[in-house]
Amino acid sequence: MDQVREVLRYHHYAYRTEQAYCQWILRYIRFHNKIHPKNLNSREIEQFLSHLTLKKNVSASTQHQALNALVFFYRNVLDIPLDKKIQPSRSKRKPKLPTVIGKKEVKHLFHHITGIHALMAKLLYGSGLRLMECVRLRIKDLDFDRKRIHILGKGDKWRSTILPDPIIPELESHIEKVKSMHHRDLEEGFGEVYIPAALGRKFRNAAMETRWQFVFPSKKRSIDPRSGRERRHHVMESGLQKAVKRAADRADIDKRVTCHTLRHSFATTMLENGINIRMLQEIMGHADVKTTELYTHVMDKDISRIKSPLEDLD
């Protein structure tokens, strides 16, 4: 497993991906009674993946993650080619429409969130950020002059979204507090933040610079599990998740409200306000416009407001 971690880090996989892949590889080995994986192949992988579907009833995305972990393990760590295409019993993807909440419900929700979590929730709803995109924001990603947020999203792809006017004063005030905290860390001999390894080698002082600090840093410094250095990481996403759930309960919203619900609500409201669906696709960071089109099924369709092209002929 040390070798697995070493290869994952060589290929610059995220720490969470490293944890997930290691967990699946261990489960696979235990499933086959600790027989060494080099003595197993595609047939045993299929058995394990089918077991996840038929016995454990995992979702399609969970099964796919397990498959990715095992394919990586065999090809990149053991250097053993799989003898045939893996075709396990597949979990079925259930079509599901996004849950959205209206403006009144959003106001009630925000009424029951306070502090840093309120600011983060407003970013999710006001800019359409994913949970981890919000948590991992850095100071350099905020462009107050152009009212833009630059986001490194899924697949390490950059995109831009709007920075809402109502949140700017509060966010600027918060940034000043973060900068003061960073200066105190520097005075105490710390102040380093995690940055990708390649950037760290190219710009050796970047990790100490203010612009690279997280917008939402944790209250305490902690030991980085990879480097062993004491750093100030970003806040845990679970805090915001709990705050949103608690606020939804207190606001008596009879829907399953999560952080992602705020992102869904942003997209739906933007469509209702007349944004072009291709532009919304770019703002949301969707690889396929079909994903964006899901919001058309839950948006408010007031046909009476639609103007016929015949009216323009007069």
Image: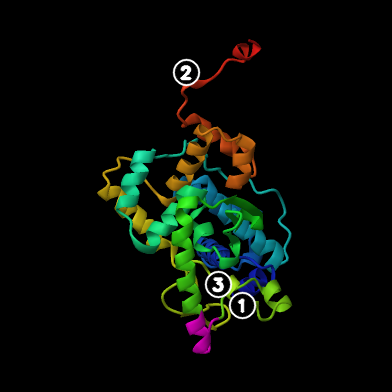
Which residue carries the number 3 mark?
A: 213
Tag 1–tag 2 contact (CB < 8 Å)? no
Which residue carries the number 2 mark?
A: 304
Which of the image's four quarters has the N terminus? bottom right
Secondary structure found at label 3: loop
Left or right: where does residue 112 sit relative to residue 204? left
Identity of the residue furthest to the front in this view: 314
Figure colour scheme: rainbow
Front position in the image: 89 or 295: 295
Residue stretch in magenta: 183-191
Three-letter code for the amino acid on which mark 3 is drawn: Gln
Structural distance between the alpha carbons of marks 3 and 1: 8 Å
Residue 12 location (% of width, % of height): 66, 68
Which residue carries the number 1 mark?
A: 207
Three-letter code for the amino acid on which mark 1 is drawn: Ala
Indicate whether 301 appears above or below 171: above
Q: Residue sitting at 57 percent across and 75 percent down? A: 210
Q: Does 35 lie within the magenta span? A: no
Indicate whether 305 appears above or below 205: above
Tag 2–tag 3 contact (CB < 8 Å)? no
Q: Which tag, 2 or 3, sits closer to the chain's start?
A: 3
Tag 3–tag 1 contact (CB < 8 Å)? no
Structural distance between the alpha carbons of marks 2 and 3: 49 Å
Residue 6 location (% of width, % of height): 64, 74
The image quadrant of residue 70 is bottom right
Q: Does 188 lie within the magenta span? A: yes
Indicate whether 73 appears above or below 122: below
Q: Nearer the viewer, mark 1 or mark 2?
A: 2
